[in-house]
Amino acid sequence: MFAYATYPSLQGMPVIVSGGASGIGEGIVRAFAAQGSKVGFVDIAEAAGNKLAAELDAAGATVKFTPCDITDIAAYQAAIKGFEAAHGPALALVNNAANDQRHSIADVSPEAWDRNIAVNLKHAFFAAQAVAPGMIAAGKGSIVNFGSVSWMTNSSQLTVYTAAKAAAHGMSRSMSREYGKHGIRTNTLVPGWIMTERQLSLWATPEALARLAEDQPLAGRLYPEDIARMVLFLAADDSRMISGQDFLVDGGWAHG
């Protein structure tokens, strides 16, 4: 029914994806692998990451998985160095990893705040810091930070998460200014409610899905592949003059 794009500039491009073993991240890893990119990805889920990498390797893709807790900045930056040694300096970084665990404002301790910010924002900054020298040397590159429609739709039980995701927009814009003179693009991708296995098992009740159907102008549901296609465009040369922008992929649900 649909025919999707192939991007010649992604063939052989070194790419790094965080949180790539499942959900949206898995969809992104698969999409880059199908384009012929050299994909390095990290995830805390070691078994799932190894399984995905083995499957893609067997299909002829160039994929390297490193198990890693992205809140351990030293370990994450070391993993990035490992991908660089295997594939060359990354020309696309996809800061996908996050955790949207529900929480009440009253229950958030300073330690819980720090953990939530670490998994939803801090790692993206330091991953960008780690790949920037290689991109600067190449005179090009793309950094894709992930936001969320949750702060645009006034979602409750997610206050620390929405604070981190709203901050990602400001971080992208400042990065776009600082890195832009080197030919590096920095944009924010903003997913709507994506029907991952986690979302379907935890929160996609019939009532919640019915409300979404009323609020989302486009009929149908969003899946990881829908997000991956926008990531591919933002990583490819086709978006070479786009930076500091927000890209909502949400069926028209939210308004930034």
Image: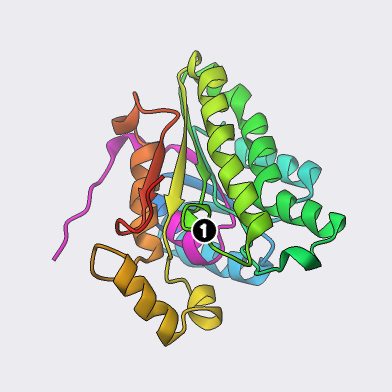
**Residue at 58% across / 48% down in the picture?**
165
In what quadrant of the picture does the N terminus appear?
bottom left
Relative vertical location of residue 27 with respect to residue 90 in this rendering, above or below: below
Is 9 in front, or is 199?
199
Where does residue 26 sit, x and y in percent of width and height? 49, 62
Where does residue 146 sit, x and y in percent of width and height? 52, 47
Relative vertical location of residue 12 with respect to residue 60 in this rendering, above or below: above
For mark 1, does the 10 Å Cα neighbourhood hold few (<14), some (14 to 19), or many (20 or more) residues?
A: few
Q: Residue furthest top?
A: 181
**Is 222 positioned to the left or the right of 21 in the image?**
left
What range of the chain is rendered magenta?
1-29
Residue type, numbered disc 1: Asn
Q: Is residue 70 visible?
A: no
In what quadrant of the picture does the C terminus appear?
top left
**Residue at 60% across / 70% down in the picture?**
48
**Is 133 positioned to the left or the right of 106 in the image?**
left
**Residue at 23% across / 48% down in the picture?**
5
- Residue where numbered disc 1 is placed: 154
